[in-house]
Image (tube, helix red, strand yellow):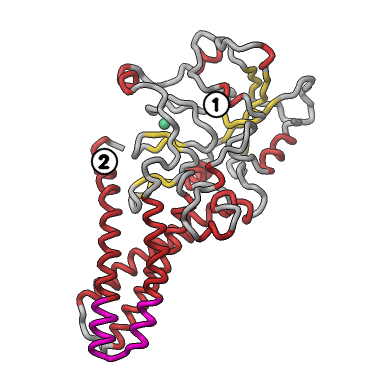
């Protein structure tokens, strides 16, 4: 994507949330004033219909607007990996990793690599090095991290860049995004239904505001429902992000470095590992007692490495352990809390199955 196209996309993304808030304000004028007060209460004297519409409208409006504001509040940091190099350095230096040099010991590995081999398994490249961002961040990439070109940063558990909410949907806000799209679909669906009813009830009176509200509610309701039901929620049931889904569709292999206990011997009836790598690497000045050897294995494109085994456990890892958190957009996802020293995200049974194939 060219820099002009990127700048245009960022500008659009920054403009859409205020626009959506403006449309929401407009719905208050149309549904509350034009329809309920002006038409139903004052003109048609349908008091009970007006009250029913107002009660349902605000019952749906409050969770929708609260979820939207909560989601927008996370846009400053949806899960960015901290930048550890200076910007001046990034301009002077090509930000790519000399992987051969790191493996051979002629180049000191960028700091932070020890976090990976402290675990018993981590996502890596085909030779056993953790994934690395060569696109400007110059950092090791924890599991499920993706570089977002729109914002130029690596983001943990990135799902997608969403211009409708002006930023990245990732580890820190996927639950709020799901809540927002769910409540937005309900809110827009109600407005659409009520406006269609009003147009029929008024015997085809052509009220421009009502027709405009029908169009807005239909458009945004359809999009919110699509984002909720077809993509994000459906993915989270399987504990797969949109980015990981694309990688799978493109048959991109995933490699995992798996700790080899002392005394491991290869078995002839099992697959051989793609590579064996020992940490600390040659240039790391760490004591040998920390020495750990890993086997690199390849996982299939259809392996759901993070699937916890049931749709409920997968949803709980994003939406919260308490069901009330599934509906109230306050607490961040449990997946924002690191899972101890062994992993960033717990591997599911797909990895255990692959390890057995390699005799590990
Ligand atoms: Zn990056």
Q: Is residue 346 magenta?
A: no
Q: Main secondary structure of the magenta part?
A: helix
| Disc nearer the start of the sequence (2/1) | 2
- Which circle marks residue 264 in the picture? none
At horizontal 57% and vertical 37% (from top left) the residue drawn is 338
Quadrant showing the N terminus: top left
The residue beneath circle 2 is: 5
Q: Is mark 1 within 8 Å of ligand 1?
A: no
In terms of depth relative to the viewer, which is nearer, 207 or 234?
207
Query: Residue 305, relative to residue 273: is it above or below?
Result: below
At horizontal 49% and vertical 11% (from top left) the residue drawn is 107
Span highlighted in magenta in the image: 33-55
| Residue 54 point in image, percent of width and height | 35, 77
| Residue 256 point in image, percent of width and height | 62, 31
| Image quadrant where residue 36 sits | bottom left
At horizontal 28% and vertical 47% (from top left) the residue drawn is 14
The residue beneath circle 1 is: 130
């Amino acid at each position: 994507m060219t820099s002009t196209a990127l700048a245009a996309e960022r500008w659009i993304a920054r403009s859409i949330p205020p626009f959506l808030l403006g449309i929401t304000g407009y719905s208050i004028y149309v549904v509350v004033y034009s329809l309920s007060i002006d038409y139903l209460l004052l003109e048609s004297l349908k008091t009970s219909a007006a009250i029913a519409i107002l009660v349902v409208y605000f019952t749906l409006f409050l969770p929708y607007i609260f979820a939207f504001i909560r989601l927008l509040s996370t846009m400053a940091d949806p899960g960015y990996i901290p930048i550890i190099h200076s910007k001046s350095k990034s301009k002077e230096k090509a930000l790519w990793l000399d992987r051969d040099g790191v493996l051979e010991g002629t180049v000191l590995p960028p700091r932070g690599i020890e976090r990976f081999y402290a675990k018993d398994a981590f996502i890596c490249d085909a030779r056993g090095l953790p994934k690395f961002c060569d696109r400007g961040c110059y950092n090791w990439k924890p599991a499920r991290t993706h570089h977002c070109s729109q914002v130029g940063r690596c983001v943990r558990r990135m799902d997608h860049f969403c211009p409708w909410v002006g930023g990245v949907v990732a580890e820190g806000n996927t639950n709020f995004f799901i809540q927002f799209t769910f409540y937005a679909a309900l809110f827009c669906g109600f407005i659409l239904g009520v406006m269609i009813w009003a147009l029929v009830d008024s015997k085809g009176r052509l009220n421009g505001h009502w027709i405009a509200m029908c169009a807005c509610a239909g458009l945004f309701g359809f999009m919110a429902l699509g984002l909720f039901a077809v993509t994000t929620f459906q993915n989270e049931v399987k504990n797969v992000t949109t980015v990981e889904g694309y990688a799978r569709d493109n048959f991109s292999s995933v490699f995992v470095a798996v700790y080899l206990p002392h005394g491991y011997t290869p078995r002839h009836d099992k697959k051989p590992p793609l590579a064996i790598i020992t940490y600390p690497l040659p240039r790391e000045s760490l004591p040998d007692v920390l020495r750990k050897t890993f086997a690199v294995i390849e996982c299939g494109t259809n392996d759901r490495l993070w699937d916890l085994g049931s749709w409920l456990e997968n949803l709980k890892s994003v939406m919260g352990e308490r069901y009330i958190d599934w509906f109230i957009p306050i607490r961040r996802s449990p997946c924002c809390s690191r899972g101890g020293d062994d992993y960033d995200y717990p591997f599911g049974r797909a990895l255990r199955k692959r390890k057995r194939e390699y005799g590990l």
